[in-house]
Image (spheres, rainbow, N blue to C red):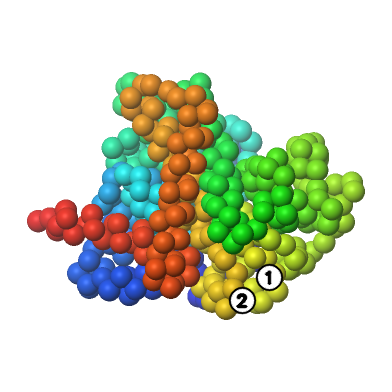
Amino acid sequence: MSTTATKTAETNAYDVALENFDLAANALELDDNLRAMIKYPERELAVSVPVRMDTGKVIRFQGYRVQHSTMRGPAKGGIRFHPNVTIDEVKALATWMTWKCAVVNIPYGGGKGGITCNPKEMSMGELERMTRRYASAILPIIGPEKDIPAPDVYTTPQIMAWIMDTYSMMKGYPVTGVVTGKPISIGGSLGRNEATARGCFYTTRASLVHLNIPLPQARVVVQGFGNAGSIAATLFHEAGAKVIAVSDTRGCIFNAKGLDMPAVVAFKAKTGSVAGFPGADRITPEALLALDCEVLIPAALENAITEENAHAVRAKIVSEAANGPVTPEADRILDSKGIFLIPDILCNAGGVTVSYFEWVQDENHLFWDENDVNAKLEKIMVRSFNDVLKIHTDKKVNMRLAANMLGVGRVAEACRIRGLYP
């Protein structure tokens, strides 16, 4: 189930984020004072974004930027353009970013932004005008030392370039470090486009080793064939695993013998969807999640695996390339089935890690080659996986709780040391 405008309380993303915080805080036995200081967002900004459309008509869109925490460094997090963006969704994503940055131990807090819109129905000119208007509206609270946006759902390096340019025009000089995920030509980092998928691949590969499953024997299913899903599927294919099913918003395809991923990627680039790919059977979204496989990668939107469909999941490993794809009720079901879950704040942290590398390169005006970027990413992802796995085995808690304990614990420690001003 993808997010909808009529989310129930049970699947409200922010309720999920708060519940996961409470579980971690209880396990860490955090005192109430620390909880009060780190649980809730530091700042929530709602902005009106009027845009002159190509017809000449002005349409107003609703925009948000939330800074959950700057306890360990500037807020960091993407901006999404999607019809179902809500303040609760943005707050949840900002909260998860705080713990995510702490899990991989990079000096950021969590932020997130979004505009409630349908970018698929907008021209490039309309998108540019909306982006620049939104950037102007949130300009007082963003900056390389304060809050650094990045791409997210339906936002691109070009959109980041427009934000960077708008901010720079207001400042009067180029400020490349104000956003990450930019084109290489204006301070982007090599390896950034593939980073989220690579992080998913590195942590999943480590999980296969932990469970004594040879990678060439792994059957992989990918739900969501956007940037993260398509690149993750390609990486597993190149590593010798068998990708047996993938899906996008228009359909799901399956071949028990394995899909030719370069051909699937080329087919989607040509047709706009994986649906109709020759040599594959069309299956339902429900059937895709229930396939017998070693690795299931939910790489779409949140709340994909719920109390209703979790019982059908037969994967040995669920790798959360998306943010919040498994609800708390589904978590408990997967845990009871003995499924090894790599939580989103670990699994998809490759993107923010290489965003951090990009910011470091921009601030130092010194750039690395792609091999260096990937090597540094692999080192951080594998180390972070082992940090979470150690809590999982030592404390006898599931991987979600272990990751949240690591992230929340690091933020709480920073808060304790910094104290409360005034």
> Which amino acid, mark 1?
Val
At 17% from the left edge and 55% from the top edge, which residue is drawn? 417
Q: In this view, which residue lies farthest toward the left? A: 422
At 76% from the left edge and 55% from the top edge, which residue is drawn? 245
Residue 127 visible at all: no
Figure check: 374 above or below 391: above
Asked if disc 2 and disc 1 are in contact, CB closer than 8 Å, the reply is yes
> Which quadrant of the rendered structure holds the C terminus?
bottom left
> Which quadrant of the rendered structure holds the N terminus?
bottom right
Residue 321 appears left or right of 65: right
Image location (x, y in percent) of residue 58: 53, 42
Image location (x, y in percent) of residue 51: 51, 40
Residue 227 appears left or right of 255: left
Figure check: 298 above or below 269: below
Q: Secondary structure at mark 1?
A: loop
The Cα atoms of the two marked residues, 2 and 1, are separated by 9 Å
Q: Nearer the viewer, mark 2 or mark 1?
A: 2
The image quadrant of residue 315 is bottom right
Q: Secondary structure at mark 2?
A: loop
User: Disc 2 marks which residue?
Assistant: 337
Q: Looking at the image, tell me whether mark 2 or mark 1 is earlier in sequence order.
A: 1
At 51% from the left edge and 35% from the top edge, which residue is drawn? 374
Label 1 neighbour load within 10 Å: few <14, some 14-19, many 20+: many
Q: Residue 130, labelled with which disc? A: none
Label 2 neighbour load within 10 Å: few <14, some 14-19, many 20+: some
> Which amino acid, mark 2?
Lys
Residue 383 visible at all: yes
Image location (x, y in percent) of residue 99: 38, 57
Choose between 47 and 230: the one closer to the eye.
230
At 68% from the left edge and 70% from the top edge, which residue is drawn? 313
User: Disc 1 marks which residue?
Assistant: 313
Figure check: 336 above or below 24: below
